[in-house]
Image (cartoon, rainbow, N blue to C red):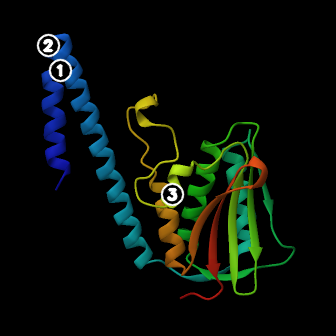
Amino acid sequence: ELKTPLAITRSSLENLSSQPLDQDARRFLQRAQDGVERQTAIVRAMSEASRLEAAINSADWETIDLNLWLQHSAEGYRSVHPQRQIETRVPGHAVSYRCAPELLAQALDKLVDNAISLSGPDDKVSLHLLPHAGHIELAVQNSGSRLPAELQGRLFNSLVSLRENPAKSQSAVPHLGLGLYIVRLVAQAHGGLASARNLPGHSGVEFTLKLPLKKP
């Protein structure tokens, strides 16, 4: 319902921009256009979250070897980011786990994208699989960044961004941080939790999915 009035507003502002305007009016017009673009991005993000929630409800569950799955995933990330250091740390045995593989892959994609975007070309990204007695931890670490104190406790909320202020970004479309919210939804679908922490000694950050061994 919001897409149509936003489209009308954008079209009207574009028509107005073609008219002769003084400097002050042009500045206010630009602010209005920026506001419309941000609202459009918010609507797009909300639609993506709704689609994911529907996908969770209809997901296919199966038992896979998380060890092999993670190593294959890492190979794919290395092919996409050949200049980056992407390593895996996995146990020396198969790790059977009942999950929705497509959803889990989507969450891992978001975490790796987050790690790549928040670190530099010389920083390292590590994918860890840690089996425990009652749960499994799937973690993505990267060096070269720290979690801001003001976002502690809100990182996995919808529309919270770790990236730079949109006003300072060269992109006209703001990044709204839906990725970590998707990670939280996927973790919850598996009966688990998503968390984040700064690593000791300013060595980087770690995002973790703590997944119970049995499907809820």
Labelled disc at residue 168:
none
Q: Nearer the viewer, mark 1 or mark 3?
A: 3
Residue 7, placed above or below residue 57:
above
Q: Earlier in the sequence, mark 2 or mark 3?
A: 2
Q: Quadrant of the N terminus?
A: bottom left
**Residue type (three-letter) at the residue carrying disc 2:** Leu
Q: Crowdedness of circle 2 by 10 Å Cα count: few (<14), some, many (20+)?
A: few
Q: Earlier in the sequence, mark 1 or mark 3?
A: 1
**Residue type (three-letter) at the residue carrying disc 1:** Ser
Q: Position of residue 183 (x, y in %)?
A: 52, 64
Residue 129, placed above or below residue 165:
below
Q: Nearer the viewer, mark 2 or mark 1?
A: 2
Q: Which residue is mark 3?
A: 155
Q: Position of residue 10 (x, y in %)?
A: 19, 35
Q: Position of residue 132 (x, y in %)?
A: 75, 81
Apparent side of residue 26 relative to residue 53 in the rendered image (left or right): left
Q: Which residue is mark 1?
A: 17
Residue at screen point 50% across, 80% down:
60
**Residue type (three-letter) at the residue carrying disc 3:** Leu
SS assignment at label 3? loop
Q: Residue furthest front?
A: 149
Residue at screen point 50% across, 67% down:
184
Q: Which residue is mark 2?
A: 21
Apparent side of residue 125 relative to residue 14 in the rendered image (left or right): right
Disc 2 + disc 1, Cβ < 8 Å: yes
SS assignment at label 1? helix
Disc 2 + disc 3, Cβ < 8 Å: no
Whole-angstrom CA distance, mark 2 to mark 3, is 42 Å
Whole-angstrom CA distance, mark 1 to mark 3, is 38 Å
